[in-house]
Amino acid sequence: MKLIRLGEEGKEIPAVLNEEGKRLDVSAFCANYDEQFFGDDGVNKLQEWLKDNAASCPVVDDSVRIGCPVARPSKVIAIGLNYSSHAKETGMEPPPEPIIFFKSTTSVCGPNDNIIIPRNSKKTDWEVELGVVIGKKASYITEAEANDYIAGYTLINDVSEREFQLERAGQWVKGKSNDNFTPIGPWLVTKDEAGDVGNLDLWLNVNGERKQGSNTSDMIFTVPFIVSYLTNFMTLLPGDVITTGTPFGVGMGLKPQQFLKPGDVVELGVENLGEARQGVVDAD
Ligand code: ZN
């Protein structure tokens, strides 16, 4: 099943993308895809409900904006340097255990919304990533249990300001949290349709030119390991989003370095999880 949220920012309604590619409004089943929905086993209940009710769901026009498939997650947790080729291009050592940092929840936006270059930014950069959405409250879970706690997967651009991240007194969160720095979607793809998330192609183009092209099999730490690992340090809530790290090919690793500028177009995708397209604009 593919969960999608549609409408203006802050007013999105829940929908599913059916097999013919039609967007079915399921607001008769639930108000939103939020912590309560995921925590109440909403994914399975919705799947059951659709068997009897899909035919009567209103169809939403394809022109309606797509929002993040999760309404205001309690946390967006990111994994740093999870591909050895990317660690190398940044000049940093692959870490012995996952580097984790937060992205502000206010940085979350829809998959096709504009990337906004923050005021005083010189180094706004891209990072295509596999995103994990948590399906139930998780604390001290094992790697073997991790899959039971996952609702599904999504596509994320972990937009990053390298000067804010690396040259402004050592807190990555500063370079990761501006408005529209976390485009998520188009969909949340449930586990049964995501395929083997340890072996998915992912890619990113800037202005039609391929910058990143890799596979999740190159990850240093796997999804089940990451989910289990995080629960040693925090409780994960339903709807929380984990972005699992980016492969080789970010702008800071290029020679010469290349960063985003107004008018650029970023396109990205993960196999089975859809594609996204973001224009680039300056902050007001
Ligand atoms: Zn990242």
Image (tube, rainbow, N blue to C red):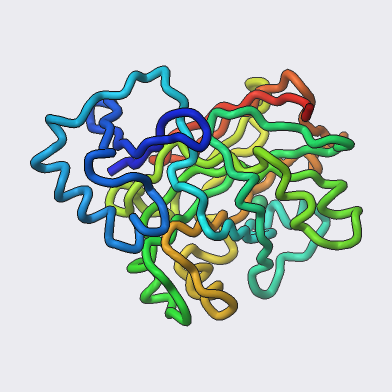
Residue 173, position as x, y percentages in the image: 74, 57
Q: Residue at x 49, y 28 (%)?
A: 8
Residue 122 appears in the figure: no
Q: Where is residue 208, by image quadrant?
A: top right
Image quarter where the N terminus lies is top left
Asked whether 202 or 133 is in front, the reply is: 133
Residue 268, position as x, y percentages in the image: 56, 33
Asked whether 122 or 249 is in front, the reply is: 122
Q: Is residue 114 above or below residue 1?
A: above
Residue 113, position as x, y percentages in the image: 58, 29
Marker count (numbered): 0
Horizontally, is 72 left or right of 48 in the view?
right
Q: Residue at x 47, y 82 (%)?
A: 140
Image quarter where the C terminus lies is top right
Horizontally, is 218 left or right of 48 in the view?
right
Q: Where is residue 273, by image quadrant?
A: top left
Horizontally, is 112 left or right of 93 in the view?
left
Residue 182 appears in the figure: yes
Asked whether 43 or 80 is in front, the reply is: 43
Asked whether 129 or 133 is in front, the reply is: 133
Q: Residue at x 70, y 52 (%)?
A: 86
Residue 72, position as x, y percentages in the image: 51, 50
Horizontally, is 206 left or right of 53 in the view?
right
Residue projecting furthest to the left: 52
Q: Residue at x 87, y 34 (%)?
A: 256
